[in-house]
Amino acid sequence: MVDIEHGTWKSKDGKLVKYTKENYRLNSQDDFNEYHLQITRWPKTTSIEIVVMSGDEGDDYENRWSDSTVYRYVKLPHAEFEAKRDELIQKVVELANQQFGYITF
């Protein structure tokens, strides 16, 4: 399942930049972290990130995730990203496995 978010980011100089995020929850055997593959489309580029959401399993589900960290792996022009999309996603999941342990897409 994919969650899609449309938003606007404000740059340091006050410029408003529109983006679209595709967020895919990754499967993991980790009880304390949740992992997401995130594809963000900016006006000129597309990036792939892994988002790690950390929390305490004792909290109720709505309030469980107290911290998140974004690890950007790739940022490419749209055409280059689309030409290599599947290969790039596979590579990012492999790198995330090396960094965080067993996760699958």
Image: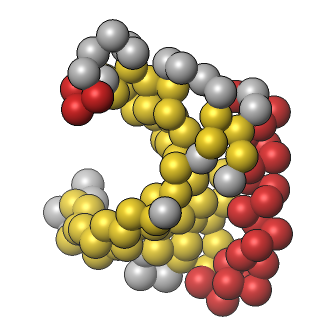
Q: Establish if 19 lies above or below 73.
A: below
Left or right: 46, with 14 as reference point:
right
**Which residue is more in the foreground, 13 or 20?**
20
Q: Which residue is drawn at 70% across and 39% down?
A: 103
Residue 21 in the image: state x and y as whole percent. 41, 66
Residue 4 higher or lower than 65, as above or below: below
Q: How many marks?
A: 0
Residue 50 visible at all: no
Residue 48 picture location, percent across and down: 60, 60
Q: Is residue 33 left or right of residue 81?
A: left
Image location (x, y in percent) of residue 2: 46, 65
**Which of these two is toward me, 44 or 24?**
24
Q: Where is residue 25 in the image (x, y as percent from the top left)?
A: 52, 50
Residue at position x 22%, y 61% from top?
Answer: 10
Task: Work out which residue is located at the far left of the displayed protein and give it.
Answer: 14
Q: Which residue is drawn at 43% across and 74% down?
A: 42
Drawn side of residue 17 relative to residue 70, left or right:
left
Q: Which of 37 and 14 is in front in this view?
A: 37
Asked if 18 appears above or below 10 in the picture, the reply is below
Quarter of the rendering containing residue 78: bottom right
Q: Which colour scheme is used?
A: secondary structure
Res 64 seen here: yes
* Residue at the image point whose x is 50% and y is 42% from the top: 51
| Residue 35 against residue 57 in the figure, above or below | below
